[in-house]
Amino acid sequence: MNAKAEALKKRTFAFALTIIAFCRVLRKTWEGRELSDQLFRCGTGIGANYRAACRARSHADFVNKMGVVVEEADEAVYWLELIQVSGSCSSPALQSLRLEAGELCAIFTQSHITARANAASRGRIKPIHQ
């Protein structure tokens, strides 16, 4: 495995740990319990699904699994934005989580686009129309 992939594995693992700690704080209100359940699943799913993508059996499998990683990262961005804008939690960790989720989403989105373009250039899948 290359160094960039290993660094992303560590980064997404650290993000998941921070999400877990944040969700513990968020659960102190009734709306926080609902929001934390959603955030917990997608926030911890980013790293788990990225690890699965790294073990893909084919390039097409990698592309598909990276699509799931992008969806999880984008969902985490959504829930963190909603938590902040709704005022559901005032934890100082919220802003840094939003920034990290946004960066992870951008990284994985670009990786997914590149992987799809590589597959399309080999004639294996249809290109994305952006």
Image (spheres, rainbow, N blue to C red):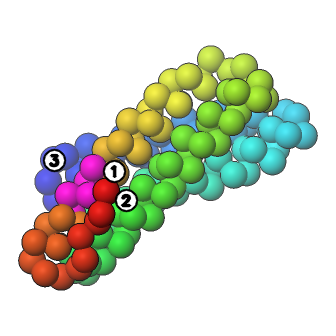
Q: Secondary structure at mark 3?
A: helix
Report if the CB atoms under discs 1 and 2 are less than 8 Å apart. Answer: yes
In the rendering, at what x and y percent does residue 26 appear? 75, 34
Query: In the shown orientation, is residue 68 left or right of residue 23?
Result: left
Q: Nearer the viewer, mark 2 or mark 3?
A: 2
Residue bearing the label numbered 1: 108
Q: Nearer the viewer, mark 1 or mark 3?
A: 1
- Report which quarter residue 65 is drawn in: bottom left
Please identify the residue farthest to the right as the structure is shown. Answer: 30
Residue bearing the label numbered 2: 50
Looking at the rendered structure, the kind of residue marked 2 is: Tyr
Q: CA distance from mark 1 to mark 3?
A: 16 Å
Query: In the shown orientation, is residue 108 left or right of residue 74?
Result: left
| Stretch of the chain drawn in magenta | 110-115
In the image shown, does 17 or 47 lie closer to the viewer? 47
Query: In the shown orientation, is residue 67 left or right of residue 43?
Result: left
In the image shown, does 7 or 74 lie closer to the viewer? 74
In the rendering, at what x and y percent does residue 37 appear? 73, 51
The mark that comes first in sequence, 2 or 3, is 3
Looking at the rendered structure, the kind of residue marked 3 is: Ala
The verdict on residue 59 being magenta is no
- Label number found at residue 3: 3
Q: Is residue 17 visible?
A: no
Looking at the rendered structure, the kind of residue marked 1 is: Phe
